[in-house]
């Protein structure tokens, strides 16, 4: 399995988790998410969801991202629909370090035809977008602690 995309930040794992745990900030760091329509009150508990839109007006699609598993301060697993491309499984892992943390984002397609591609090709396809998402996530966490 691919190690995904990684970013080191000066922000603590707790500061990064605070951004992840605030569903209303989702569109601020997720590339392609244009607005948040609703966030379940239990977010980021397993089964809870963020109801958001993707795209740029006038081509905006309503979508949903659901929590599959949550280990507060350490890991968040999401099922994200990426219409019209299908569904993806995204794992965000936070690795505390002496100063700050390392954020790891692993994304895999779970619906055909993209799920049939080797992990290395899937990673190469999403790496630029995920790299920008982690950059935004780190900036938000750093601003909150800064």
Image (tube, grey):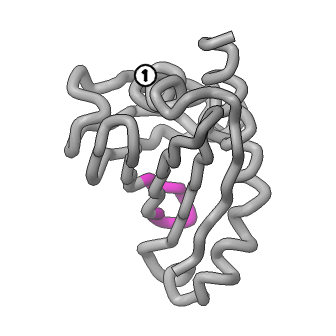
Indicate whether 18 appears above or below 66: above
- Tell me which residue sits at (73%, 70%) in the image: 125
Tag count in the figure? Answer: 1
- Tell me which residue sits at (29%, 45%) in the image: 70
Q: Quadrant of residue 56?
A: top right
Mark 1 residue element = loop
Answer left or right for 68 relative to 138.
left
Q: Where does the image place residue 55, in percent across and percent down from the top left?
A: 66, 40
Answer left or right for 47 relative to 51.
left
Can residue 36 be spotted in the picture?
no
Give the class, few, some or many, for how many residues have Cα within 10 Å of label 1's Cα (few <14, many ≥20).
few
- Tell me which residue sits at (52%, 42%) in the image: 96
Q: Quadrant of residue 2?
A: bottom right
Seen from the viewer's position, the closer of residues 50 and 146 is 146
Seen from the viewer's position, the closer of residues 115 and 146 is 146
Indicate whether 145 appears above or below 99: above
78 inside magenta stretch? no
Answer left or right for 77 relative to 84.
left
Q: Which residues are magenta?
A: 80-88
Answer left or right for 129 relative to 106.
right
Q: Which residue is mark 1?
A: 22
Which quadrant holds the C terminus? top right
The residue positioned farthest toward the front in the image shown? 98
Seen from the viewer's position, the closer of residues 11 and 143 is 11
- Tell me which residue sits at (42%, 73%) in the image: 110
Can residue 76 be spotted in the picture?
yes
Q: Where does the image place residue 114, in percent across and percent down from the top left?
A: 56, 79
Indicate whether 114 appears above or below 61: below
């Amino acid at each position: 399995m691919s190690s995904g995309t990684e970013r080191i930040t000066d922000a603590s794992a707790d500061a990064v988790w605070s951004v992840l745990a605030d569903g209303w900030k989702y569109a601020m760091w997720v590339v392609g998410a244009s607005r948040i329509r609703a966030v379940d009150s239990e977010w980021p508990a397993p089964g809870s969801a963020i109801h958001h839109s993707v795209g740029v007006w006038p081509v905006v699609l309503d979508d949903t991202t659901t929590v599959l598993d949550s280990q507060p301060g350490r890991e968040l697993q999401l099922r994200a629909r990426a219409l019209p491309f299908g569904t993806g499984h995204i794992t965000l892992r936070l690795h505390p370090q002496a100063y700050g943390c390392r954020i790891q984002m692993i994304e895999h397609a779970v619906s055909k035809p993209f799920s049939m591609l080797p992990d290395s090709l899937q990673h190469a396809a999403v790496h630029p977008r995920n790299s920008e998402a982690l950059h935004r996530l780190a900036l938000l966490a750093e601003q909150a602690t800064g």
